[in-house]
Structure formats: structure tokens, C-alpha cells
């Protein structure tokens, strides 16, 4: 009998749900869920529509049953009457109603403010929506025409919603689709195709100047404004995070109107972000992405960004790191609004900790680190969790005064030890450390934890957008729990994916191991992905920021970005900005027998591929004398069809100069090693060989060309993802650095300054290293001329 009754009840509920306009599939799925069935039945009864209603009203009632904020249940009947009377008739209005009611909670409902926040009485005609759609399409026309049907329609609809928040979203979508069809016409096969990878092309027989390469197809992120995904400060009253508790209650995190209004008054409605590095190491390319997001969002919205040092651990901070961070931030092209330190707020943080104890949300604990770990694993409360508030206040004061030994007490937040989220297991707020602080001196012997301090300082600095990487996502619950417990302003939190680049490691622990164990030559070793290392390698901030922008601001974690993608942007930048010069790495002497020893012909060499003949600044002078040097690898004793270098009896062109023909080869006593080549040049230039070689000449008889040291860098690790390897140090590339101490360069290089970039023809892009002296220049190879990314690399 009970089974029959149960089936009968379900049939009645199904019939009820169909009456309010739910489609059969949704209705049956709802009946299968007891909780939603109970909620929806109550909502239909409260709304007085047990005999049925329109599909539009029914769908809104279903949304109320599944999403209504539980902290405002007394106001649900009021909302239902607004829905039934069609004063609230769109999902946008309903979402706004949820946000307003969640903020109001159990307080008295101000109907005037409620109606204003939900757009009650605001009529948006189809013509209004059509006009807004036309304006958005016109503003983004260039991008739409380029991307065609790969355009992100969601972003365009977002602009329409911002203009008309109470417009019908379905009508807006229909009108936008029609407008796009009017602009673009029928979809073509190309619109539906995924961009195909290009086959890798064979490298040229002899690499010439790096001509501009065909750029890879741009992703939508490179064309669209990457910051469109972030809300505006005035929208930070909406619930966008829910924190479930083990007792079944849910904390819906949002600001009250009062808190938000106070915040907006303090900031003038501006966007305020922060870049918060710990001063315990050197910044790497992942920090470049963080800077691009933090500083970039503020710049895009005409706001400001703090540079804030998270200096809560007095044992790890060093002035060296602080100086480095400020220098690198500036080098990357960003200007902080203000430089602050978490330690600036130690007094406020302490006072708020006292308040947290008074509110029953924190307690002094005496468990050891091992005991805390064990209790967390078992989801057990500390034996001191429920000690009297007065006792915790007294003990916390003793901690502050240095009356309790280090390690004998901590202040812990009273969160939820039975939660499914490990970061709600009564995190530590304060610990004792009898270590003077680099900035605060010996004033404090208790120091706040990151989990306690970073969210509070965000609030105290009125940060609008608290942006961090995805590994902090599980800490969002703790972040909002603490601000809610203290009743202070809550910034908008958003996490993005980490930047993981191939053939390198970026964890501070691994980088520190490489440096301290001298596997590399310091934090600015050009093989490292530290920003100091990239700078020393000759990679520009412009190229790094272009690389980061191209990747986009997404939440798809775990993606490994090929280092070739960074190299593509480096080549693009240096191809435009680096002047050309010629250097021979492994010189082979060539004596021009038909040119007198004491004579030289001055020739013009191009600094830029598109140099105009009438622009003298676009050229540099080089002597063509009777002794020149070419690369050893550009000469062979045996010629072949696919070889374009020099060989006995064969001709090549010396770039910018003359054709030469090999007439004799001088060998060493072993009859194999080539010591010298004799050749004749063609002053008439009538000879037209295919091979073109770079070269350097003696500036005057018996005087060697400019001697330079060249350092060739390759990937630091052999594997794409060495961080996954147990023996990651065993994966180090033994040929990641090759020193060439006696290369020859053209004399125009002798006045090159540290940090100057050049393209050495046929060799790659190079930069003058800081190890250079007045006696000898040192050049680091930034990147080769060969480009794989634009030929299908990822």
C-alpha cells in the first residue's frame, strides 16, 4: 500500500507541474528529486496557481523553487505575487530579486527599493532591444567581420544586457542572430571548420634574414577585450558564491547595500585591484600573467592597482626580493597606484582578530602541528574549540605580549571541521614567532597567516576584484566566511588558470633548488623562466605581454603552453625592432687572391630588410678586404645538389658584397682539417650563385675582426613537463648552454650597449649581456630565426 500511495503522489505532482507549463521531461526529472518536488509544490501553493498558469510564469516559479536564497524565506510569498502578476517577468529581473532578497535577509522588505532593483514597471520594447543590438554590432563590427561566425555571441549579448538589463534575453538573442546574418550572410563551410594545423615546412637550405613569418590564426582572446568577463564594482551586491556547511545551511556571499554604498563612496566607483607577491623569491613568467590581469584590468577600467607585499612571514622576506619585484614590475610596463605591505595593517588585523573572538568565531588552540593535521584528517574538533570567549581573549593577549612559548598556542578560526572543503577546517589565523620583522621590528611576536590576512587587507584597501590562480579556488569559502563573520566589505573573487610553459619548472621550491645547488648561474640565468632570466636573454616586456594576452584569461587549468608560442611573439617583436648585423661563430679564413692585401672595398650592409637607399641611417659600412671569414659549416670538400654553401670550384655570394669562387683549399697535416680557403671574387657581379653567406672581414691587413663571446641557449629541460618527473633534475639538458669564446663580429657592434638587441644574420636574435667589458662583448642568443609555432605549433 505505501508504494501505491507514493506512486499516486508522484502522479499528482507530475500533473501539477505540467499544469504550470513545465515540459514533460523537466517535470518528470523534478518528480524524481524529492527536495525539488517539495520546494516546487510549496511555491505553487504559495503562488496560488494550483489550477495552472502560463509557461513563462511557471518557468520562473521553477527557478524560485531551485534558487531562492534560504536566508530570506519570509519574503518568498511577496516575490511570488510579483511573478504571478507579471511585474517580475524575466529571468534578469528574477536574478536581481534573488540578489536583493539575499542581501535583505530577514530584515523588513523595502518594496520601493525592491522594485527599483528588479526593474519593476520598466518596459523595454522590441524596438529598444533592436536599437541596443544594432549599437553593439556597430561597435564590434571590425572584429565580427574578421571572426565571422566564430564571434563570441555571449560577449555581444553581455553588452546588450548591460545596456538594457531588463530586456527580454530571448528576444535579444533572436535579434542579434538576425543582425549577424544580415551582416555576414549564409554560413560557409569555412565558418564551421576548425582551424587546421599547417604541415611543418622544410627549413630553407640556407637560412637568410628572418623575413616576417605568416602569423598563426589569432584566437578570439587576442581580438576581444580580455577584461570583458569581469563585473563592474556597482554590481558587487549579487550572490556569486555559496558556502555550504555540514549542518545543511548555506552562506550566500554578497555585500549588503549599506556596505557596497560605503565602498563605492570611498572609491568613487573606481576599479581597485592588487598584485600581491610574497617577497621571498624572484618573479617568473606566471607572475607576468598575474600582472597582466591585475594591472591590466585596472588600466582598462580607468582604475588603479596596488603593489602589495604579503610580508607575513618575517623569516622569508629579503630586501633583495622587494627591490627586484619593484624593478621588474616597472620593467614590465606597469605602474602601481601605491606600494603597500600586509605589515602596514598589523594593528588593524590584530584588532579584528579580537573582534572575531568576541563574536565566537575564533579560539586559542594548543594543539601541535601534528595533532592539528591528525584532527583535520579525522574531521574532529579541537578539545579547545569550545573554550569560553573570555578565556580565548585572555590567552590571545598573552600570545601578543610574548607570555606564551613559540609553538604552544595558535589562534584558529571557528569554521566547519565537518565540511567537505579542507580549507574550512578551522584554519590558523595567528601563530607565535619570536622573530623581528623587517619592517615592523620587534613590535610583534604574533604574525597573521595568509588565510587570515589577505582577504581582510583586500577589504581594508577596498579592492574591487581579488584575482588569483585556480589553486586558491577552494580557499574562496574561507575568504568569504571570514569577511562575513566580521561584517566587512567583500571584494569580488575570481580565479584564473595558472600559466604552465613547457620545458621548464616554475615552482619556487624547484627554482630555488636550481639556483642554490648551482645547476644554473643565478636567478637571472637566461635559461630560466624568471622574468630576470627572460630579460637577460633579451626577451622584451612587449613580447611577454603579447604572449600572455594571446593565451587569454581562462579557467581551463592544466594546459601546458608550448614555449614555441612565446618564441613566436619574441620573433614578431624583434623582427621589427632589432637591427641586423653579421657575426661568424666558427670562423674559417678565406683569402681573396685577386684583391690586393692593402686594399679594401667599403660596402653598405642593411640594418633593416626594408631599408631605403636614400636613408643612410638604415645602413652600416663594412670593409671587403682580401681576408674574410665565413662559418666552418658553410664549407664542404664534397658538393651536392641540395647544398648551397662553398665547395672547391663552386661560387657563393658574400652578403652585400661580391660572388666568390673557391680555387684552392689548404689542409692541415692530417690531410682532412681545413685550415684556409683561397678564392677569387667577381668584381662585376655577373656570377649569380644561389648560396648567400654571412661573413666578416679583417678591417685592415693583419688585424683580426672584432672578437666577441657568444652564448647559445637551448631548452633547460629535455621533457615538455619536467615538473611531473620524480627525478626532474635528471632531465636537465646537458647542452642547454654552449659558449663560443672567439666568434668574429662586424666592427659596427663595438659600441653596443648592455641590453641592446640585434639580429645576427642567418643565426638568430641576440642581446648584449651584462658580462660584457670594454675589452670583449658578450652576446646571449634570445631565439633562433626558425619558427615552429606559426607553422602549426601550439
Image: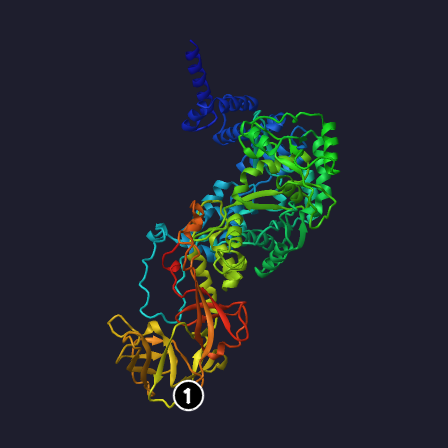
* Residue 97 shows in this picture: no
Residue at the (57%, 38%) spot, across then down? 475
Give the x, y percent position of residue 504: 46, 53
Image quadrant of residue 447? Answer: top right
- Answer with the quarter of the image where residue 595 lies: bottom left
| Between 471 and 791, the one nearer to me in the picture | 471
How far across and down, in percent of the image, does residue 628 sit? 38, 81
Residue placed furthest toward the top: 1
- How crowded pointer 1 is (Cα within 10 Å; few <14, some 14-19, many 20+) is rated as some
Q: Is residue 746 above or below residue 459?
A: below
Quadrant housing residue 250? top right
Residue 352 horizontal/vertical position (percent):
71, 38
Q: Along the horizontal axis of the image, is 754 left or right of 667?
A: right
- Quarter occupied by the C terminus: bottom left
**Mark 1 = which residue?**
600
Q: Nearer the viewer, residue 422 or 304?
A: 422
Amino acid at each position: 500500500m505505501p508504494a501505491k500511495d507514493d506512486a499516486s503522489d508522484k502522479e499528482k505532482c507530475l500533473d501539477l507541474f505540467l499544469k504550470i507549463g513545465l515540459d514533460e521531461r523537466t517535470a518528470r526529472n523534478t518528480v524524481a528529486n524529492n527536495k525539488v518536488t517539495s520546494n516546487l509544490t510549496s511555491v505553487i501553493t504559495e503562488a496560488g496557481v494550483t489550477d495552472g498558469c502560463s509557461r513563462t510564469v511557471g518557468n520562473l516559479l521553477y527557478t524560485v523553487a531551485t534558487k531562492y536564497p534560504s536566508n530570506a524565506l519570509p519574503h518568498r510569498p511577496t516575490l511570488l505575487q510579483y511573478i504571478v502578476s507579471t511585474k517580475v517577468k524575466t529571468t534578469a529581473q528574477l536574478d536581481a530579486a534573488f540578489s536583493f532578497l539575499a542581501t535583505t535577509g530577514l530584515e523588513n522588505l523595502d518594496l520601493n527599493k525592491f522594485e527599483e532593483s528588479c526593474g519593476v514597471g520598466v518596459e523595454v520594447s522590441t524596438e529598444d532591444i533592436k536599437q541596443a543590438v544594432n549599437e553593439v554590432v556597430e561597435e564590434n563590427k571590425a572584429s565580427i567581420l574578421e571572426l565571422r561566425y566564430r564571434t563570441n555571441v555571449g560577449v555581444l549579448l553581455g553588452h546588450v544586457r548591460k545596456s538594457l538589463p531588463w530586456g527580454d534575453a530571448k528576444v535579444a538573442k533572436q535579434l542579434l542572430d538576425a543582425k549577424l546574418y544580415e551582416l555576414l550572410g549564409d554560413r560557409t563551410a569555412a565558418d564551421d571548420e576548425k582551424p587546421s594545423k599547417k604541415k611543418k615546412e622544410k627549413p630553407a637550405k640556407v637560412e637568410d634574414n628572418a623575413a616576417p613569418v605568416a602569423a598563426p590564426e589569432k584566437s578570439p582572446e587576442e581580438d576581444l577585450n580580455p577584461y570583458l568577463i569581469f563585473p563592474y564594482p556597482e554590481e558587487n551586491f549579487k550572490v556569486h558564491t555559496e558556502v555550504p556547511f555540514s549542518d545543511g545551511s548555506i552562506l550566500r556571499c554578497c555585500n549588503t547595500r549599506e556596505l557596497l554604498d560605503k565602498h563605492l563612496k570611498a572609491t568613487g566607483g573606481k576599479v581597485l585591484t592588487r598584485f600581491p607577491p610574497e617577497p621571498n623569491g624572484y618573479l617568473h613568467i606566471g607572475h607576468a600573467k598575474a600582472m597582466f590581469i591585475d594591472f591590466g584590468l585596472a588600466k582598462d577600467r580607468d582604475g588603479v592597482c596596488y603593489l602589495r607585499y604579503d610580508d607575513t612571514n618575517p623569516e622569508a622576506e629579503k630586501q633583495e626580493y622587494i627591490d627586484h619585484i619593484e624593478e621588474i614590475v616597472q620593467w614590465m610596463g606597469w605602474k602601481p597606484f601605491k606600494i603597500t605591505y600586509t605589515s602596514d595593517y598589523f594593528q588593524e588585523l590584530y584588532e579584528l582578530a579580537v573582534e572575531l573572538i568576541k563574536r565566537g568565531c575564533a579560539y586559542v588552540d594548543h594543539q601541535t602541528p601534528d595533532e592539528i593535521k591528525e584532527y583535520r584528517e579525522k574531521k574532529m574538533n579541537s578539545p579547545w574549540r569550545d573554550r569560553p570567549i573570555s578565556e580565548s581573549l585572555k590567552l590571545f593577549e598573552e600570545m601578543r605580549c610574548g607570555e606564551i612559548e613559540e609553538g604552544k598556542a595558535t589562534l584558529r578560526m571557528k569554521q566547519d571541521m565537518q565540511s567537505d572543503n579542507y580549507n574550512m577546517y578551522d584554519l590558523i589565523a595567528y601563530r607565535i614567532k619570536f622573530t623581528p620583522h623587517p619592517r615592523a621590528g620587534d613590535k610583534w611576536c604574533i604574525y597573521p597567516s595568509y588565510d587570515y590576512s589577505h582577504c581582510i587587507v583586500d577589504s581594508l584597501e577596498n579592492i574591487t576584484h581579488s584575482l588569483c590562480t585556480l589553486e586558491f579556488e577552494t580557499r574562496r569559502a574561507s575568504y568569504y566566511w571570514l569577511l562575513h563573520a566580521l561584517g566587512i566589505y567583500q571584494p569580488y573573487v575570481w580565479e584564473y588558470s595558472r600559466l604552465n610553459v613547457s620545458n621548464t619548472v616554475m615552482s619556487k621550491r624547484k627554482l630555488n633548488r636550481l639556483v642554490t645547488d648551482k645547476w644554473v648561474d643565478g636567478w637571472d640565468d637566461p635559461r630560466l623562466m624568471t622574468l630576470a632570466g627572460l630579460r637577460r636573454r633579451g626577451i622584451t616586456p612587449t613580447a611577454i605581454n603579447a604572449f600572455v594576452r594571446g593565451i587569454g584569461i581562462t579557467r581551463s587549468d592544466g594546459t601546458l603552453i608550448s614555449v614555441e608560442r612565446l618564441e613566436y611573439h619574441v620573433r614578431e617583436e624583434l623582427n621589427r625592432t632589432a637591427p641586423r648585423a653579421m657575426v661568424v661563430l666558427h670562423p674559417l679564413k678565406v683569402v681573396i687572391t685577386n684583391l690586393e692585401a692593402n686594399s679594401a672595398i667599403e660596402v653598405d650592409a642593411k640594418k633593416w630588410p626594408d631599408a631605403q637607399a636614400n636613408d643612410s641611417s638604415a645602413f652600416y659600412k663594412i670593409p671587403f678586404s682580401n681576408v674574410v671569414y665565413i662559418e666552418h659549416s658553410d664549407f664542404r670538400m664534397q658538393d651536392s645538389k641540395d647544398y648551397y654553401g662553398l665547395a672547391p670550384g663552386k661560387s657563393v655570394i658574400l652578403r652585400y658584397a661580391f660572388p666568390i669562387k673557391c680555387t684552392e683549399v689548404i689542409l692541415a697535416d692530417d690531410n682532412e682539417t681545413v685550415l684556409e680557403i683561397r678564392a677569387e671574387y667577381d668584381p662585376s657581379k655577373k656570377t649569380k650563385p644561389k648560396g648567400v653567406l654571412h661573413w666578416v672581414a679583417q678591417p685592415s691587413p693583419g688585424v683580426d675582426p672584432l672578437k666577441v663571446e657568444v652564448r647559445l641557449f637551448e631548452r633547460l629541460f629535455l621533457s615538455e613537463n619536467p615538473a611531473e618527473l620524480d627525478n626532474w633534475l635528471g632531465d636537465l639538458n646537458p647542452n642547454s648552454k654552449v659558449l663560443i669564446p672567439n666568434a668574429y663580429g662586424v666592427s659596427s657592434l663595438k659600441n653596443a650597449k648592455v641590453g641592446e638587441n640585434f639580429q645576427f644574420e642567418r643565426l638568430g636574435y641576440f642581446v648584449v649581456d651584462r658580462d660584457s667589458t670594454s675589452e670583449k662583448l658578450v652576446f646571449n642568443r634570445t631565439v633562433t630565426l626558425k619558427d615552429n609555432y606559426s607553422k602549426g605549433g601550439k
